Amino acid sequence: KEREKNIVMMQRLLLLAQLSCAFAAIAVSPHSLKMHHEWDKAVAANEWSRWQKAFDRADQNRDGMIKIADVHTVFVEHHNLAHDSEEVHPAGGAADHDDYEGEFRNFQRHCTEAGRSDNELISFSEFRRLMEGNMAALAEQRGALLQHSKHIF
């Protein structure tokens, strides 16, 4: 039994070391990977309540619209909602904007390529459409890293 525990522990350490190298190689933070997995779970289950609540928290005037520039806040709020839920493993506490800077830049780049500007207002359904395209592009880049990190997040 002890030997099996040691083998499992060594395998986990090796996986973490490999992921650390992969994070550095493609500049993906653990927060970004966790968010990507949370997005994929929402897609698979067609369950958007947590994402909707995060969007609503970013909607300061409560008109159902946010600026593309405010999507950064959606990412942070979603993390904090997920962190507060019992079904998601905590990953170091509450997030702030710095934790999702890279993920927001990816989203911003995707929006720019789609002809959208930071000051443009979007609804939750538009946010979802933009995120679907963004996450599909990121999934191609992150490929094996997403597969391996499923077991951690």
Image (cartoon, rainbow, N blue to C red):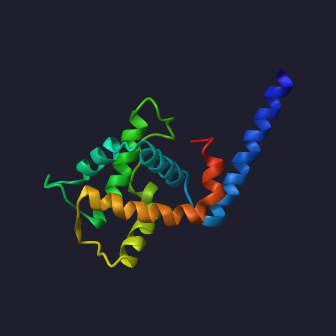
Residue at the (67%, 53%) spot, across then down:
19
Residue at the (41%, 60%) spot, across then down:
132
Rendered-image quadrant of the C terminus: top right
In this picture, residue 117 sits left or right of residue 65: right
User: Residue 25, image x and y in percent?
Assistant: 66, 65
> Can you tell which quarter of the image residue 85 is in?
top left
> Can you tell which quarter of the image residue 63 is in?
bottom left
Question: Could you tell me if residue 27 is visible in this image?
Answer: no
User: Residue 118, image x and y in percent?
Assistant: 29, 72
Question: Could you tell me if residue 67 is visible in this image?
Answer: yes
User: Residue 22, image x and y in percent?
Assistant: 67, 59
> Can you tell which quarter of the image residue 46 is in?
top left
Rendered-image quadrant of the N terminus: top right
Residue at the (41%, 66%) spot, across then down:
107
Viewer-nearest residue: 146 or 90: 146
User: Residue 56, image x and y in percent?
Assistant: 23, 49
